Amino acid sequence: MPKTPKKPEKAVIPPNVEGLRAEVREENITDTLRDNFMPYAMSVIVSRAIPEIDGFKPSHRKLLYTMYKMGLLTGARTKSANVVGQTMRLNPHGEAAIYETLVRLARGYEALLHPFIDSKGNFGKVYSRDMAYAASRYTEVKLDGICAEIFGEIDRDTVDFTDNYDNTLKEPMLLPTVFPNVLVSQNLGIAVGMASNFCGFNLAEVCRTTIAFLRDPGCDILDTLPAPDFPTGGEIIYNKDAMRGIYQTGRGGFRVRAKWRYLPKENIIEVFEIPYTTTVEAIMDKCAELVKAGKLKEVSDIRDETDLKGLRITFDLKRGTDHEKLMLRLFKQTPLMDAFSVNLNLLIAGTPFTLGVDKILEEWCAWRTECVRRRLFNDAAKLREKLHLLHGLAKILLDIDRAIKIIRETDEESEVVPNLMIGFRIDERQAEYVAEIKLRNINRAYLLGRTEETKRLENAVKDLEDTLKDPKRVRDILIADLKRVMDKYGAPRRSELVSESDVEDFRPEEHIEDYAVHVFITEGGYLKKITPNSLRLSGEHKLKENDRIIASLDARNKDEILFFTSRQQCYKARLHEFEDSKASQMGEYVPGKLGFESGEALLFTCLPEDYSKHLLIGFENGKAARVELGAYATVSNRRKLQNAFSDKSPAVSFMVLEGDRELIMTTTEPRAIVFHSAQLSPKTTRNTQGVSVISPKGRHRAEKLCAPSELGVANLERFRVRSLPSVGVALRAQDLGNEQLTMNN
């Protein structure tokens, strides 16, 4: 009888918690994500990971502004630990995180084309994974000279300020850079749901492009800004159309490869510049992996000789090595050539946008124009304030004796300013200014100087007001600033451009040594690849106990080879992937090298050559399938093909068919049938079940499908049939001539 299901037990509430009941509320998952996850995601995007139009992330901005307030723009260096500690007042992070930010901005680390921090001590290198930077208590820093172009206008009301995290200090929301730092400094940020990856550009080229853009927004940016530039140098594989696509969309990628030279006297290759995206250790590890796998036989030694003079990786070559071909292979198989993915994602007014280079320049020019206008307005306001004081002084100068009399006859010091205000009809600020003038300055030269200064200030204020009203004059100021920065800090391009059409692609088959070989396959799954000379000098084959050779093939080292297994799978390999062997050696174990599955056995091996022949497969159920070898050809370098042949019945025989011929199929009874291969129509489907050829009786099964000559059948006419399938003709001992027939029960 079916069991009665148990009733669910009631939840037990602890007796010591009286009145406590669990409250279950239903919430919409969308609302929960919006209320909890989205604020966090936006905080990471806006306040941490994505740079803004000034080219800085918040951590960079807080660090540099702290150093500016510490007087490190013009003063001597200070310990990095001091800077890190002061930065915590603006950036509520741990010491390690802040110091890592400082290291990346430092000149010693070499991560930026134009570093913002002048450093002293060990800061590691961007191109080294294992070269650790020293602790902050050992290194010293100050702001680099280019920071004068970042902080030169910060005290002139060019940007807005906001409270820090505990409302005790003010910090700038942006830094008023006078050049498009957003394009000059390489920047990487990973936020929640989005990322940013800015490639650096040459400062002189960026300034020149911005000037051209200010004069003509429709200019072709590629004329003055052909490609990015990297502090580690290297060669950019240049495709103008692809680069134009990156400039327009803000997304894309290009390849960067190392710079190298060949020294014929020493027979070595020196790599002295590598892609920005890799490290020396990554290159060395990959090369060591190739050496271990026997794929870098031309190299006798690899050394990392990087020192204080710079990066250097040395390859010692064996005699006769073609260094050009070797470097093509290394570019293909190691990080000596790497791809850089561009994602120009930045914040505009707190909102992330992915912009092309032209749009970034448009946004930067609009933002910089506003900075300049605010600077001019601030300068004009200060001049007006000073002019206002001088106007008050001018009224006093009309009757200086009266002013002296008022001051002398005033009983209390606090009454001096009010009395001057009443006596000369001036405001409090003007009266304060007059009252602070020293008695020694009341002379003719001083008074005439103030009068001339008044005229100069009036002209300066008028000029500033005219500039604010004229967009062309504001634009000229931007251009003048850019020219000054370009002339002062511009440097030659580090990354060279190599046209994609001039780059030779790596073709593996061209780098493989080709020579004749003899291939031997054993029943146990071992493969021996032996050269003719070695085979002539060899004795008997060394085999495992109870193992035997089941196939012998004449081939070339570049040939492809197919392995068919008991799991209806076909494994593909190239003969050059197998080590040259000798008859006295065991050979290489194919299942282990190609990764056969557990219990998977090797059934048949063949050389497909040009894939023009056919593969003939005989099955236990008496069927035979004729499959075009072209069905096993693949465009990609796939190593394993599933469903290589039918699994409806076990395969008993394989053979490669070149042209039509007579075949014989036998059963375990024993019976045989002779037929023509033309009666089997070729199939392009690998796992076709084939055509019924012979019909085994009872518990008997098909045993072999081969050429009649392999069995030595004397009278073929006796076994020929008019149509398929057939039960076959009984085999007799005399039908096989001298061969003795083995009866299978």
Image: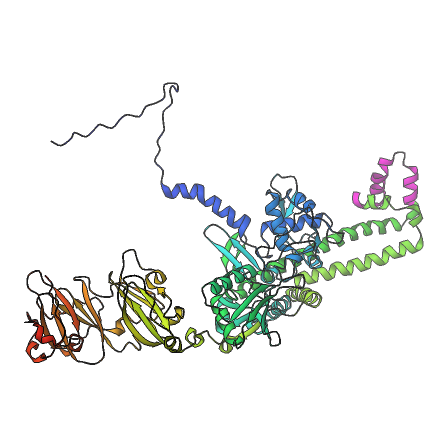
The quarter of the picture where the N terminus appears is: top left
Q: Magenta stretch containing residue 428, yes or no?
A: yes
Apparent side of residue 736 relative to residue 142 in the rendered image (left or right): left
Way the structure is coloured:
rainbow
Q: Determine whether 582 is above or below 83 in the image.
A: below
The x, y position of residue 97, in whole percent, is 59, 47
The x, y position of residue 374, in whole percent, is 66, 55
The x, y position of residue 399, in whole percent, is 90, 49
Q: Determine whether 60 is above or below 269 in the image.
A: above
Of residue 25 and residue 191, the one placed in the foreground of this image is 191
Q: Determine whether 10 is above or below 212 in the image.
A: above
Q: Residue at x 64, y 68 (%)?
A: 204
Apparent side of residue 98 relative to residue 720 in the rendered image (left or right): right
Asked if residue 329 can be seen in this view, the reply is yes
Q: Which residue is drawn at 61% across and 71% down?
A: 212
Asked if residue 341 can be seen in this view, the reply is no
The quarter of the picture where the C terminus appears is: bottom left
Q: Residue at x 36, y 27 (%)?
A: 22
Of residue 442 and residue 654, the one placed in the foreground of this image is 654
